[in-house]
Amino acid sequence: MIIAVDGPTASGKGTIAKALAAHYGLPHLDTGLLYRAVGRQVALQGGDPDKADDALAACDFPDAVLSDPELRTEHTGGLASRVSIHPEVRRALYDRQRSFAMQPGGAVLDGRDIGTVIAPEADVKLFVTATVEARAERRFREMEDRGGGGTTLADIAANLRRRDERDSGRKDAPLAIASDAYVIDTTGLDRAEAISAVIEIVDSALKARAAKPR
Ligand code: DC
């Protein structure tokens, strides 16, 4: 079974994807991490994330970059969003994501274009969203828990808006809701409520599929 989980940054899609993977015993890939690794590698190589050649050269990042704690920062998230605009970069990362999705037994992938480009045949597609205010609040709390990031709530919200615009406005594989995706708004939900809501959605989608004559 392939489960595609798409949505904007800090929507809760990563938490939901991880929980679904654990619940259904499936491997999970956070595809944002690949774009973050490219963004980080561009910076390490002294390149310009807005130049396709520099970004493409960074797609060969060593595996060690994937466990670099810098990948989790807002700064690297911004670099990831900038390198992800280049079709060359998206093409370079496609095979890795596609073969993860197609492995025997299936997988859960989260990102921006899983249900639309990477695995359009996914058995269940979820689009996880929340208001900018709720997402900024969550990011802010995460930062406080890690000892504070020196940014204000307003800065985080402005940053999220910029990222949303760039991710939704790009020409190649923009953040978009697949026509057959279930949309879940996590604004008023806590972690446990969001997880049980998506498990219910996946279970009923699977039941409906099984009942359909082939
Ligand atoms: O999900 P995230 O915040 O870790 O993603 C970082 C950036 O990577 C995001 O702003 C856009 C890009 N990205 C993408 O273009 N396609 C994906 N499937 C995943 C992430």
Image (cartoon, rainbow, N blue to C red):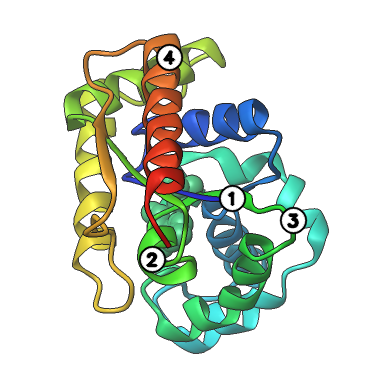
Marks 2 and 4: which is nearer the front? 4
Q: Is mark 1 within 8 Å of ligand 1?
A: no
Residue 58: give x, y in percent of width and height: 63, 75
Q: Is residue 128 above or below residue 121?
A: above
Tell me what residue is drawn at x 66 percent, y 28 percent: 22
Q: Amino acid at mark 3?
A: Val
Could you give the CA–CA distance between mark 1 and mark 2, rounded to whole angstroms?
Answer: 32 Å
Q: Residue furthest front?
A: 213
State which image quarter holds ligand 1: bottom left
Residue 207: give x, y in percent of width and height: 43, 36
Q: Amino acid at mark 2?
A: Arg
Labels 3 and 2: the sequence-earlier one: 3
Tell me what residue is drawn at x 35 percent, y 26 percent: 151
Q: Quadrant of the C terminus?
A: bottom left
Q: Which structural element holds mark 2?
A: helix
Q: Is mark 3 within 8 Å of ligand 1?
A: no
Check disc 4 and report the residue beneath it. 191
In the foreground, 5 or 85: 5
Could you give the CA–CA distance between mark 3 and mark 1, rounded to whole angstroms?
Answer: 29 Å
Marks 1 and 2: which is nearer the front? 1
Labels 3 and 4: the sequence-earlier one: 3
Check disc 2 and report the residue beneath it. 82
Q: Are marks 1 and 2 in contact (CB under 8 Å)?
A: no
Labels 2 and 4: the sequence-earlier one: 2
Check disc 1 and report the residue beneath it. 1
Marks 3 and 1: which is nearer the front? 1
Q: Is residue 26 above or below residue 57?
A: above
